[in-house]
Each structure stands twice: as C-alpha cells, then as structure tokens.
C-alpha cells in the first residue's frame, strides 16, 4: 500500500489499494476490497471486502459500498449514497458471493447525495442520478434521472451539463448521438 494515506482514525485493511488514495477518519475499507489509485474515501464511508472501486473514485461521507458493487473509473458517490446487494434480505439467511445481485456503476457516473441503488442494476457511463433518488432499474449512459423510482428527465454531458433538445452540450459544445438505450459523444 505504498503511497496510500490513511487518517489515524481511518481503517484500511485491504492490501489492494492504489497509490494516491486517501482514506479519511472513521472510514473503513475491509480486507479484500479492491480500490484503485487516486481515490478519495471520506469520513464514515464503508467499503466491503468484495467491492471494487476503479481509479479516481470519490466516495463522500457515510457512503456504503457493499459486496457485489463495482464502480468503474471517475465515479462520484455523493454523501450518504447507499448500495444494496440482497433483493430479499432476512436476518436468518446469510447470503454471500453468487447469491448476491451485482451492481455496476460505469465510468464517469455521478450519484447525488442520499441516492439508494437497488442491487442488480447498472448505471451507465456519465449518467447523473439526482440527490435522494432510488435507482430500481438500469440507467442508460448520459441519462439524467431523479425521483423514487428514478426516471429519466433528460440527458447530461460528460461535463455534467444538461443537454439541449439537439443532444448538444451548451457548456462545452459536445454533440451526442443515440446508442442503444443511452447516448455517446459524437466523433
């Protein structure tokens, strides 16, 4: 774990943490968790032993990342975001491994404060989930979703600006085209 900063009040038990990553006070990264380089794991966050965080992932305060969750590079997890991994939890059932439903957060996606992600879903590249939303189904690439359950209200650019009706970003000028259920940047 060379080049990893762990606050004196933080706990990082994993050996698979990339250089430049910071683990702050009262955060806990369990053994076996895989954390990329240059991540920021803020106060009170919890990363379970089979969770995977790519490079440059921001995990804000009190985020809960459980087994079966994979976040690709450049993902932003807002304060108090929480992932589930068991569709039918019961205290007397101790499920693990393949019995848990995986969740994938694709590169560049943003989850706002207080987002709840129900297991078994995929959040597409550069998607933006508004604060307080409950994600209960897949979110397409570049989609802007809000609510309970989260529903698409528009599209966003990689720079996080809402796209106009022509799927062009008014901030950076990037044009987008449909690709399956989502969008991709043109060119």
Image (cartoon, rainbow, N blue to C red):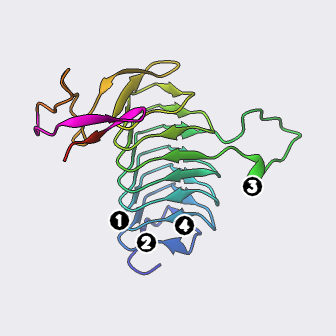
Q: Which residue is mark 3?
A: 97
The alpha-carbon separation of the residues under discs 3 and 4 comes to 22 Å
Residues marked 1 and 2 touching at CB (< 8 Å): yes
The residue stretch that appears in magenta: 171-183
Which residue lies at the image location 59% right of the left edge and 56% below the top edge?
51
SS for callout 4: strand
Q: Earlier in the sequence, mark 3 or mark 4?
A: 4
Q: Which residue is mark 4?
A: 12
Q: Earlier in the sequence, mark 2 or mark 3?
A: 2
The alpha-carbon separation of the residues under discs 2 and 3 comes to 24 Å
Residue 16, magenta (yes or no): no
SS for callout 2: loop
- Residue 181's x, y, as percent? 42, 32
Of marks 1 and 4, the one in the foreground: 1
Q: Earlier in the sequence, mark 1 or mark 4?
A: 4
Question: Label 3: how many residues lie within 10 Å, few (<14), some (14-19) or many (20+)?
Answer: few
Q: Which quadrant of the structure image shows residue 166?
A: top left
């Amino acid at each position: 774990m060379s080049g990893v900063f762990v606050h004196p009040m933080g706990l990082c038990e994993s050996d698979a943490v990339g250089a430049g990553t910071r683990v702050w006070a009262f955060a806990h990264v369990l053994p076996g968790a895989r954390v990329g380089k240059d991540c920021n794991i803020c106060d009170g966050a919890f990363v379970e032993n089979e969770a995977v965080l790519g490079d440059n992932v921001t995990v804000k305060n009190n985020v809960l990342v459980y087994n079966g969750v994979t976040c690709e590079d450049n993902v932003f997890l807002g304060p108090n975001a929480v992932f589930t991994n068991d569709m039918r939890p019961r205290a007397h059932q101790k499920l693990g491994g393949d019995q848990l439903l995986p969740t994938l957060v694709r590169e560049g996606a943003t989850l706002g404060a207080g987002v709840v992600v129900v297991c078994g879903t995929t959040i597409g590249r550069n998607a933006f989930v508004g604060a307080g939303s409950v994600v209960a189904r897949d979110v397409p690439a570049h989609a802007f979703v809000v609510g309970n359950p989260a529903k698409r209200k528009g599209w966003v650019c990689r720079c996080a600006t809402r796209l106009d009706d022509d799927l062009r970003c008014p901030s950076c000028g990037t044009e987008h085209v449909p690709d399956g259920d989502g969008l991709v940047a043109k060119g």
